[in-house]
Image: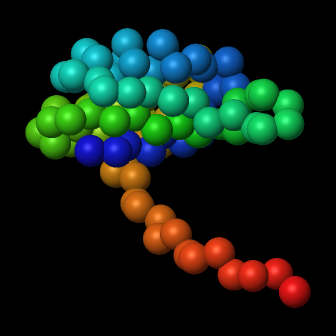
Amino acid sequence: MNIFIGNLSYHVQDEELASLFGQHGEVESARVIKDRETGRSRGFAFVVMPDDGDANSAIDALNGHDLNGRPIRVNQAIEKERNERRPRY
């Protein structure tokens, strides 16, 4: 399951998220989303957990959890439909 984490402190790193979510089950990946130009965190991340039961447990336990002074928002990520590229004229 792909999990969205919002309201992240700009200082949180991938490893810290992997460790936090790892307390609830296996973590396949943890990635803080960064700005392409500055390389700074954009304040949100995605964690992938292969077991849906573990993922739901993590969502329930960590939504509102204080991480580096900020209450994080944790929920199942909604897959965004990708539009086909339209030609520019």
Residue that protrudes farthest toward the bottom in the picture: 89
Q: Is residue 36 left or right of residue 53?
A: right
Q: Residue furthest left?
A: 53
Give the image location of residue 79, x and y in percent.
41, 61
How many numbered marks have been drawn onto this rendered protein structure? 0
Pick the front one: 4 or 67:
4
- Residue at 44% across, 27% down: 30
Quarter location, residue 48: top left
Residue shown at 54% from the left, 42% from the top:
6
Tell which of 62 and 17 is nearer to you.
17
Q: Is residue 20 above or below residue 42?
A: above
Nearest the camera: 16 or 85?
A: 85
Looking at the image, residue 73 sits to the left or right of residue 89; the answer is left
In this rendering, is residue 22 above or below 32? Answer: above
Residue drawn at point x = 78 percent, y = 38 percent? 36
Can residue 24 be seen here? yes
| Picture quarter with the N terminus | top left
Measured from the top left, where is residue 55 in percent x and y?
Answer: 23, 37
